[in-house]
Amino acid sequence: METLSDELLIKSYNDAKTNNLNLDFIRLLEDEIYRRIVVKLITTSKTEDILTIQSLTLDSNVVNEYFNLA
């Protein structure tokens, strides 16, 4: 999963949802998207306040905006 680019991961997720693929597969893709977002937020964050990071809400629009794929 880590060898997929962010763009290909998002495209795969959107295609999986469009084609009604297995929900477990879709969830696997979602988990990887969120994992990448969290890793990027933590590595780019200048704060060490984990509560600030934990309080961030993520939805599909945030995912697309974050990866500049909207």
Image (cartoon, rainbow, N blue to C red):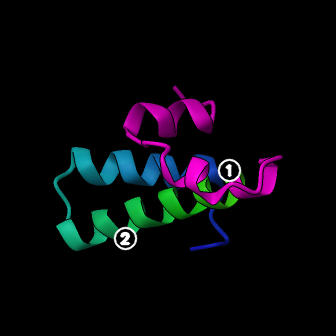
Q: Nearer the viewer, residue 36 or 38?
A: 38
Spatial separation of the CA atoms under disc 1 and disc 2 = 20 Å
Q: Which residues are magenta?
A: 42-70
Residue 10 painted magenta:
no
The amino acid marked with disc number 2 is Leu
The residue lying at 16 percent from left, 54 percent from top is 20
Of mark 1 and mark 2, the one earlier in the sequence is 2
Q: For this view, does 35 lie left or right of residue 14?
A: right
**Image quarter of the N terminus:** bottom right
Name above or below for residue 68 compared with residue 29: above
Name above or below for residue 11 compared with residue 31: above
Q: For this view, does 11 lie left or right of residue 14?
A: right
Q: For this view, does 5 lie left or right of residue 19?
A: right
Name above or below for residue 18 compared with residue 70: below
Name above or below for residue 32 compared with residue 13: below
Measured as percent of width and height from the top left, residue 67 is found at 62, 38
* Tag in front: 1 or 2: 1
Q: Quadrant of residue 60?
A: top left
Measured as percent of width and height from the top left, residue 53 is found at 59, 51
The residue lying at 67 percent from left, 61 percent from top is 39
Residue 41: assigned label = 1
Crowd tier of the residue under label 1, counting other residues whose Cα lies within 10 Å: few below 14, some 14–19, many 20 or above: some
CB atoms of marks 1 and 2 within 8 Å: no
Measured as percent of width and height from the top left, residue 70 is found at 51, 25
The residue that mark 2 highlights is 28
Residue 13: assigned label = none
